[in-house]
Image: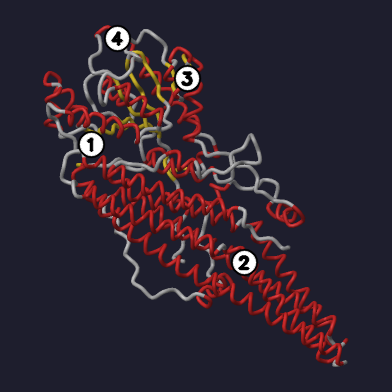
C-alpha cells in the first residue's frame, strides 16, 4: 500500500451552496421586500454555519473557513431574481458562481439595457459557460432549461422567486422548481410580490399545495435544520457488538468510542506485515492473475480533477489496507481451525508423552482465532473496509462527472446509508454520505466553457469504462477459477475422508488397531481441511462476485456504446445534456453494483464459531 496522506489532507472546509431561479421581470415596488426576504434567508444560513463551526466536534474535523467562502451562491445572473440574490450574496461576503446558458456576448442580447450591471457581477464570479444556443427556435428554451437544471445539480438549497403558478414554458421557474423537488432539493419559495412570508418546499405535496407548506418561523427553523445536516457530521450509533467477544471489544475500546468520521480523518498508513498478505497469497495460489496490460487511468489535468483524484487515492489506499486485514483474517482463522481440530483429534489418539504437546498446539490455535476475532471487532477492519470502499467509489465516479458540473444522483448516494439500530442516532455508514456531500460542496466550481469540458468528459468516461471492464473481466476469471478450485479441494478432501472411513472399517474388522489409529488422525485432518475450504468459499462469495462481474460487463459494454453514440454529436449545441445523462446513468449503475456488494459483505463479519 502506498499509504494514506495525512489526516489534514482529508479535512474539508465548510460550504453551503444556494441556487436561484425566478422571474426576470419584477415590479419596482416588490424589489425592496424581496431583497429583505432574500437577505433573511442568506443570513439564517450564514449565521447557522458560523454557530456550528464554532462547536468543538465540527471544528475538529474541518479546515478553517478561510479556505473557501462558507456561503456560495449559484446564479445565471439574468435580470430580476438571479441578480437580486447575487447582489445580496455579495453584500454578505458570499462567493458567486455563474453558469451561463451560452456565451456572455449572446446572453447580453437578452438584456441590452442592463449589460453594465451584468458585466459587473460577472467580474466578481467564477464563470462556466454551457453549450447552449440562442436562436429563435426551441434550442433557446432548452438552453435555459439546461442552465436551470445545472443550478439545481450544484446547489444545496434553491431560492425560487415566482408566483407559484404552473409551467409557462420550457425552462421556466415552475419547471426548474419541480425538477429540484424531484431531485430531492429543498426550495425556499419567495412570492414575487414580496408580500407573503417565505415557504420551504421539500416534497411534491408541498409543491402541489403551497398554502399548506411550512412558512414563517417554522420554515426558518427547518432551514436551520437543513443547514445543520449539511455542516455538522452525523452522530453515529455504536458499533454492533454482541456476545463474549463484543463485551471484550467494548471493554478495550472504552466507553466513549470515537466517531467513524473522526477515525477516518485520523487514519495513518497501516503496516504491510506479511500476515496481512495471507488472502493475496491464497488467491495467487488457487487462481493466479491473468497476465494482461491493464488500461491506464486518465490522468487528472484540472484543479477540480486533481481534487477528486487525490481524495480517491487516499481513501482507496485505506480501503485496500483494511480489506487485506479483514480477508486475510478469515483465511488465517480457517487455517488455525484446521490446526486446532487436527491437534484435538491427535491428542486423543496419541501417546501420553505427546498429548500435552497436542493440547498446547490446540490451545494456541484457539487463542489465535480469538485474537483475530477480537482484533477485527476492536479495530473494525470489516466496517472500515466497506465504508472506505464506498467512499472511494463515490470519488472515482465523481471524477468522471465533475468536469461538466454533474454529480452522482442523490438517491444513489443516500442508498449507501444502512439502517441504524439506534433510532436517535445515524447509521454507522452515514458519515460516508455526509463526507462525500461535504466534498461536493467544498469542490471548486467548473470554469471555462462546456464545449471543452464535454470533450474531456468523454475522454474520462472512456477511460473509466475501459478500466472497469478490465477489472470486472479479471475478477470474473479469478473468482470463477478460485471458486472452482476451492470446490475441487473440498470434494477431494471429502473423498479421501470417505475412503479412509472405509479403510478404518475394514481395519476394525481385521483387528488392525494401528491402521485404525492413523486412519482416525488422517480422517480428522482431512475433514478439518474440507471444512476450512467450505468456510473460505462461503465467506469469499466467489460465485456471487462472478455473477456480479458478468452482469456489470454487459452494463458497461452498453454504456460504451451509448457514450460513443453521444460523442458523435460532441460539437453540437446542448450535446452536453446527452453526454451528461449517459455518464450519469453509467455511474449510477456502477454505484448500484457497489452498494449491493456492500450490503452483502456488511453481514460477513468474522466470527469465532
* Mark-to-mark CA distance, 1 and 2: 51 Å
Q: Which residue is the site of mark 1?
A: 127
Tell me if 282 is positioned left or right of 295 in this view. right
Q: Which residue is the site of mark 4?
A: 30
**Helix, strand, or loop for circle 4?**
helix
Q: Is residue 412 above or below residue 270?
A: above
**Helix, strand, or loop for circle 2?**
helix
Instruction: Pick whichever, 593 or 555, lies toward us.
Output: 555
Mark 4 or mark 1, earlier in chain: 4
Tell me if 261 is positioned left or right of 569 in this view. right
Q: Pointers 4 and 3 in contact (CB under 8 A)?
A: no
The quadrant in which residue 143 appears is: top left
* Mark-to-mark CA distance, 4 and 1: 29 Å
* Mark-to-mark CA distance, 2 and 3: 51 Å
**How many residues crowd around disc 4 within 10 Å: few (fewer than 14), some, or many (20 or more)?**
some
Mark 4 or mark 3, earlier in chain: 4
Task: For marks 2 and 4, give the one nearer the viewer.
Answer: 2
**How many residues crowd around disc 3 within 10 Å: few (fewer than 14), some, or many (20 or more)?**
many
What residue is shown at x 72% (from left), y 84% (from top)? 499
* Mark-to-mark CA distance, 2 and 4: 68 Å
Q: Is residue 89 above or below residue 379?
A: above
* Mark-to-mark CA distance, 4 and 3: 21 Å
Q: Position of residue 10 (x, y in %)?
A: 44, 50
Q: Which residue is the site of mark 3?
A: 220
Mark 2 or mark 3, earlier in chain: 3
Q: Pointers 2 and 3 in contact (CB under 8 A)?
A: no
Amino acid at each position: 500500500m502506498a499509504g494514506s496522506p495525512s489526516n489534514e489532507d482529508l479535512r474539508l472546509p465548510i460550504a453551503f451552496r444556494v441556487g436561484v431561479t425566478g422571474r426576470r421581470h419584477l415590479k419596482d415596488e416588490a424589489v425592496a421586500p424581496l431583497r429583505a426576504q432574500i437577505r433573511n434567508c442568506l443570513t439564517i444560513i450564514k449565521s447557522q454555519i458560523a454557530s456550528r463551526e464554532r462547536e468543538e466536534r465540527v471544528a475538529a474535523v474541518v479546515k478553517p473557513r478561510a479556505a473557501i467562502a462558507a456561503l456560495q451562491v449559484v446564479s445565471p445572473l439574468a435580470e430580476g431574481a438571479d441578480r437580486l440574490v447575487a447582489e445580496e450574496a455579495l453584500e454578505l461576503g458570499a462567493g458567486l458562481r455563474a453558469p451561463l446558458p451560452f456565451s456572455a456576448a449572446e446572453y447580453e442580447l437578452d438584456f441590452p439595457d442592463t449589460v453594465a450591471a451584468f458585466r459587473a457581477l460577472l467580474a466578481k464570479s467564477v464563470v462556466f459557460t454551457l453549450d447552449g444556443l440562442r436562436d429563435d427556435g426551441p434550442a433557446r428554451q432548452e438552453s435555459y432549461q439546461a442552465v436551470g437544471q445545472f443550478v439545481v445539480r450544484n446547489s444545496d438549497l434553491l431560492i425560487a422567486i415566482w408566483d407559484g403558478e404552473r409551467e409557462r414554458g420550457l425552462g421556466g421557474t415552475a419547471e426548474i422548481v419541480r425538477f429540484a423537488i424531484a431531485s430531492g432539493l429543498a426550495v425556499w419559495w419567495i412570492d414575487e410580490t414580496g408580500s407573503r412570508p417565505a415557504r420551504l418546499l421539500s416534497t411534491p405535496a408541498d409543491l402541489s399545495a403551497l398554502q399548506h407548506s411550512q412558512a414563517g418561523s417554522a420554515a426558518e427553523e427547518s432551514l436551520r435544520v437543513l443547514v445543520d445536516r449539511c455542516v455538522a457530521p452525523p452522530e453515529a450509533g455504536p458499533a454492533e457488538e454482541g456476545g463474549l467477544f463484543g463485551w471484550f471489544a467494548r471493554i478495550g475500546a472504552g466507553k466513549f468510542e470515537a466517531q467513524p468520521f473522526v477515525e477516518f480523518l485520523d487514519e495513518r498508513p497501516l503496516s504491510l506485515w506479511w500476515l496481512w498478505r495471507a488472502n493475496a497469497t491464497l488467491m495467487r495460489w488457487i487462481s493466479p492473475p491473468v497476465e494482461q496490460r491493464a488500461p491506464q487511468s486518465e490522468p487528472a489535468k484540472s484543479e477540480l480533477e486533481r481534487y477528486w483524484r487525490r481524495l480517491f487515492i487516499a481513501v482507496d489506499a485505506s480501503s485496500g489496507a483494511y480489506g487485506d486485514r479483514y480477508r486475510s483474517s478469515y483465511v488465517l482463522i480457517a487455517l488455525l481451525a484446521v490446526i486446532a481440530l487436527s491437534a484435538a483429534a491427535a491428542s486423543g489418539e496419541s501417546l501420553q508423552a505427546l498429548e500435552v504437546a497436542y493440547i498446547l498446539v490446540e490451545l494456541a490455535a484457539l487463542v489465535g482465532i480469538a485474537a483475530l476475532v477480537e482484533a477485527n471487532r476492536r479495530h473494525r477492519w470489516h466496517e472500515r473496509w466497506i465504508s472506505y470502499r464506498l467512499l472511494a467509489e463515490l470519488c472515482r465516479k465523481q471524477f468522471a462527472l465533475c468536469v461538466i458540473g454533474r454529480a452522482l444522483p442523490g438517491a444513489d448516494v443516500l442508498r449507501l446509508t444502512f439502517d441504524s439500530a439506534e433510532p436517535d442516532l445515524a447509521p454507522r455508514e452515514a458519515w460516508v454520505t455526509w463526507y462525500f456531500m461535504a466534498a461536493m460542496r467544498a469542490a471548486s466550481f467548473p470554469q471555462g466553457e462546456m464545449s471543452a469540458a464535454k470533450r474531456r468528459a468523454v475522454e474520462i468516461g472512456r477511460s473509466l469504462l475501459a478500466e472497469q471492464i478490465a477489472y470486472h473481466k479479471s475478477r470474473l476469471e479469478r473468482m470463477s477459477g478460485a471458486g472452482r478450485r476451492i470446490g475441487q479441494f473440498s470434494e477431494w478432501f471429502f473423498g479421501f475422508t470417505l475412503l479412509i472411513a472405509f479403510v478404518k472399517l475394514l481395519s476394525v474388522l481385521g483387528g488392525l488397531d494401528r491402521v485404525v489409529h492413523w486412519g482416525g488422525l488422517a480422517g480428522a485432518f482431512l475433514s478439518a481441511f474440507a471444512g476450512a475450504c467450505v468456510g473460505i468459499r462461503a465467506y469469499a462469495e466467489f460465485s456471487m462476485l462472478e455473477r456480479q462481474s458478468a452482469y456489470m460487463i454487459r452494463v458497461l459494454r452498453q454504456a460504451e456504446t451509448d457514450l460513443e453514440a453521444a460523442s458523435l454529436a460532441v460539437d453540437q449545441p446542448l450535446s452536453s445534456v446527452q453526454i451528461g445523462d449517459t455518464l450519469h446513468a453509467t455511474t449510477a449503475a456502477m454505484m448500484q453494483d457497489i452498494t449491493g456488494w456492500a450490503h452483502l459483505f456488511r453481514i460477513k463479519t468474522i466470527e469465532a464459531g
